[in-house]
Image (cartoon, coloured by chain):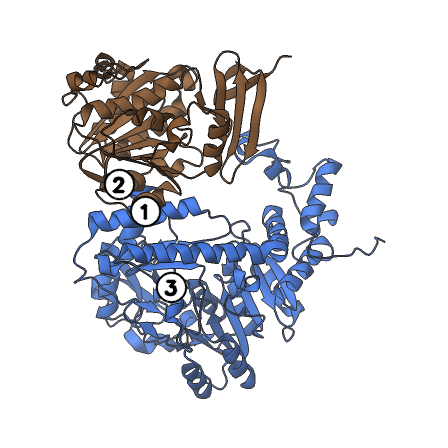
Chain colours: A blue, B brown
């Protein structure tokens, strides 16, 4: 029987167990077959011995992600405490897996779920998997910036009233651009109606640790939140957290996670979550204060160039922009006559600067704990030079990002229904059976079950012409699209 | 006692200098700063373990980065010097009476402080009344300048450390914008000999070629730098570094130099075949 250990945020149980494991020099007659890297010298020299040496399998001293009882459970408990959650699940399939587990835990086939249309594709993917039906609350749009904002409270109220049997409300906290809805009030509306409140916090990890940042989902009383630790939290790509509140059955969520999660959880990913959680708990406040200061500085400098609009808290309007995440450095580029995606490409091709994404009207530079002022100076100077070299008349540039969807059938019905492939240009009026999106940001332009309109086709061609990377359809060239056979009435074919 | 300072010029090549005394060691906000007293090279300043200057051979660098543009452009009055906290470049520039203003932008105040204390000869002209020292990030400073200077001298450390931003397209473009319409920019361009250095040199030269109408490389031999072989870039909006050299006028100034001559000026633009080939690839290939 092991001694009762005192756990506090200074410990990192998975990391410590791996360090102990390394000392033991255990002989591996188990998987993985590279055997601490010895069997794959090229890989070892590329990634380093430190790294491949802890790429090991679940075993008694290291616990098991599918059924954690020792160090992984301790790491989850510490994460829950650090994030103010009832329970935290370490996730190794990206925040996509957190979002899907969150949706699959709350909805089953035929259930309604209330959500904004500007969700990440992983949310609608989850609906394809479980057969729940989306009830879209159209986000407000800032026509000047061409971006979708948050959900208005009145719209959420209306959706709840019209769909009293819906099981959950899902909220982006925040959107990719940093826009937050009124999380606390939406939680209350959902709970008063007997619904769960779920949050996609892929871009909100830092809300749990910063000062003067928007409220986090757990603090607002939400029932579940998918948190991208690998974005602002500093852990390795593909590691993530799923947080749950007291009204959610931990055992049920674990079962749902185990439906699709690997049984060979990566210790590289898990230890990175453990170490990053410790860092955030011990130093997050200082770290994010610095990030906010850098973003504020960059915003001022970019706005001083002229033409660009690095927007921030001035958008806050008490409703559809209830709050704004000032660590996000989003810049509206239309006034200099360039689409965001064009600025994104020029920055990479000519200045060796890679930013997070560019869409039709905006770019987003992702700032985090790893940034330094000297790199920000480069970004600002490059933007100044791009304006000098490329500025042109902005008329003729499209500004609108959001197109109101007409949902004809549920994503799952449309995805599995009888379908045919049509040239994109001839598809207006048909019902789409697959996704079309620019990636990033990965918010679908078309989702399965939605009507294709001439306006949507124009938008897709425009985005393609500007150099956006389009993804989603079966046809990799995106010249053809799958539509339901028989038009709008076969939405119920598979019932 | 057998005390040596060593610097890796590549992972497989090490250059060592015997040390009498380690005079100073400190870490600033940006880098580690050291000063050694050595029997062969006198006092040696290193940043992050890379030799920046030695008392014995600094004249080569300082003369070549200053007198070349000064002998070409007919009337340099306003100068911006970036980096160069040791004061060697400024020392050469202040010898010209025609110069009206020298703005020195150095991000690290501690470098200047250390040089004033340990390399007083080098730093001696930093107090010249024409010199204005600004402690600032150079990219930030220069972004705000437009058609303000006749000459910009970029005296940076190598492109793999805190000076990385001074080898970028956005920086050269800002320099171009900060120069008057007949302005000249001279920068230290690294060494073409070892592979990693050569690739960095080609990258930054390409960026300058894409920014300025005239862009030429010239060379000097500097014993304590990698391969003992160093390059400078001459970028200009109007003047050609050889065709517009006014040797007579420069000689009349009667400046005594130890390395630079107007004959060497012309010769320094004639490059070895392997280097010509590398530059051709950058200038015409794509």
Image quadrant where one finds the C terminus of chain A: bottom left
CA gap, disc 3 and disc 2? 36 Å
Circles 1 and 2 on the same chain: no
Q: Indicate the chain on which mark 3 is placed.
A: A
Q: Quadrant of residue A494?
A: bottom left
Q: Nearer the viewer, residue A142 or B188?
A: B188
- x and y percent of residue A297 in the render? 41, 55
Residue beneath label 2, please?
B173
Q: Nearer the viewer, residue B20 or A21?
A: B20
Crowding near the residue tagged with mark 1, few <14, some 14–19, many ≥20 C-alpha atoms within 10 Å: many
Q: Quadrant of residue A242?
A: bottom right
Q: Is residue A419 left or right of residue B113?
A: left
Mark 1 and mark 2 in contact? Answer it, CB < 8 Å: yes
Residue A443 has which mark? 3
Q: Is residue A108 above or below residue A473?
A: below
- Residue at 23% from the left image edge and 55% from the top image edge: A338
């Amino acid at each position: 029987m092991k001694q009762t250990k005192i756990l506090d945020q200074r410990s990192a149980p998975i990391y410590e167990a791996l360090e102990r494991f390394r000392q033991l020099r255990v002989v591996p007659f188990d998987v993985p077959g590279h055997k601490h890297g010895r069997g794959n010298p090229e890989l070892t020299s590329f990634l380093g011995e430190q790294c491949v040496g802890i790429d090991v399998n679940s075993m008694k001293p290291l616990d098991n992600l599918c059924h954690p009882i020792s160090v992984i459970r301790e790491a989850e408990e510490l994460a829950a405490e650090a994030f103010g959650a009832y329970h935290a699940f370490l996730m190794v399939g990206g925040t996509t897996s957190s979002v899907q587990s969150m949706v699959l835990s709350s909805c089953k086939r035929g259930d309604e779920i209330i959500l904004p249309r500007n969700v990440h594709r992983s949310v609608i993917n989850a609906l394809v998997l479980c057969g729940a039906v989306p009830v879209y609350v159209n986000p407000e749009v800032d026509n000047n910036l061409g971006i979708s904002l948050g959900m208005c409270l009145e719209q959420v109220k209306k959706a709840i009233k019209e769909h009293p049997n819906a099981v959950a409300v899902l909220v982006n906290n925040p959107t990719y651009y940093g826009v937050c809805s009124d999380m606390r009030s939406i939680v209350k509306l959902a709970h008063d109606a007997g619904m769960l409140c779920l949050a996609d916090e892929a871009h909100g990890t830092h809300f749990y640790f910063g000062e003067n940042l928007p409220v986090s989902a757990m603090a607002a009383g939400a029932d579940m939140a998918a948190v991208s630790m690998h974005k602002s939290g500093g852990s390795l790509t593909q590691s993530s957290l799923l947080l749950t509140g007291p009204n959610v059955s931990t055992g049920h969520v674990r079962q749902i996670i185990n439906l699709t999660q690997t049984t060979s959880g990566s210790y590289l990913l898990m230890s990175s979550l453990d170490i990053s959680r410790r860092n955030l708990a011990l130093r997050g406040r200082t770290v994010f204060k610095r990030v906010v200061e850098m973003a504020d500085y960059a915003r001022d400098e970019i706005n001083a160039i002229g033409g660009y609009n690095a927007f921030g808290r001035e958008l806050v309007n008490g409703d559809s922009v209830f709050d704004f995440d000032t660590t996000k450095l989003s810049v509206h580029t239309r006034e200099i006559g360039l689409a965001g995606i064009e600025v994104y490409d020029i920055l990479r091709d000519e200045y060796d600067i890679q930013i997070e994404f560019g869409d039709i009207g905006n770019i987003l530079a992702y700032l985090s704990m790893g940034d330094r002022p000297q790199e920000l100076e480069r970004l600002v100077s490059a933007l100044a030079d791009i304006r000098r070299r490329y500025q042109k008349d902005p008329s003729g540039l499209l500004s609108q990002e959001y197109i109101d969807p007409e949902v004809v059938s549920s994503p799952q019905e449309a995805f599995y229904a009888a379908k045919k492939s049509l040239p994109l240009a001839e598809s207006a009026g048909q019902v789409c059976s697959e996704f079309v999106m620019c990636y990033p940001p990965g918010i679908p332009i078309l989702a399965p079950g939605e009507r294709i309109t001439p306006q949507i086709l124009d938008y897709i061609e425009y985005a393609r012409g500007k150099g956006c990377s389009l993804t989603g359809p079966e046809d990799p060239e995106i010249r053809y699209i799958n539509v339901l056979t028989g038009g709008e009435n076969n939405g119920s074919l598979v019932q | 006692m057998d005390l040596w300072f060593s610097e890796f010029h590549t992972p497989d090549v090490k250059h060592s200098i015997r040390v009498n005394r380690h005079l100073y060691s400190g870490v600033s906000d940006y880098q580690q700063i050291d000063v050694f007293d050595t029997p062969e090279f006198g006092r040696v300043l290193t940043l992050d373990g890379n030799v920046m200057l030695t008392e014995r051979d600094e004249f080569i660098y300082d003369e070549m980065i200053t007198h070349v543009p000064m002998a070409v452009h007919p009337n340099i009055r306003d100068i911006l010097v970036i980096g160069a906290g040791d004061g060697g470049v400024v020392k050469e520039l202040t010898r010209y009476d025609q110069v009206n203003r020298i703005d020195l932008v150095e991000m690290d105040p501690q470098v200047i402080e250390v040089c004033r204390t340990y390399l007083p000869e080098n730093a001696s002209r930093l107090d010249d009344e024409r010199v204005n020292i600004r402690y600032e990030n150079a990219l930030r400073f220069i972004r705000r300048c437009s058609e303000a200077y006749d000459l910009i001298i970029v005296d940076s450390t190598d492109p793999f450390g805190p000076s990385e931003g001074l080898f970028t397209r956005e920086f050269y473009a800002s320099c171009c914008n900060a120069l008057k319409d007949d302005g000249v920019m001279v920068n230290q361009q690294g060494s073409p000999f070892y592979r990693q250095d050569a690739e960095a040199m080609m990258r930054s030269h390409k960026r300058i070629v894409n920014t300025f109408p005239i862009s030429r490389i010239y060379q000097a031999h500097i014993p304590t730098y990698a391969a003992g072989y160093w390059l400078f870039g001459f970028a200009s909006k109007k003047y050609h570094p050889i065709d517009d050299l006014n040797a007579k006028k420069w000689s009349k100034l009667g400046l005594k130099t130890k390395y630079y001559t107007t004959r060497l000026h012309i010769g320094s633009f004639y490059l070895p075949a392997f280097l010509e080939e590398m530059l051709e690839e950058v200038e015409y290939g794509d």
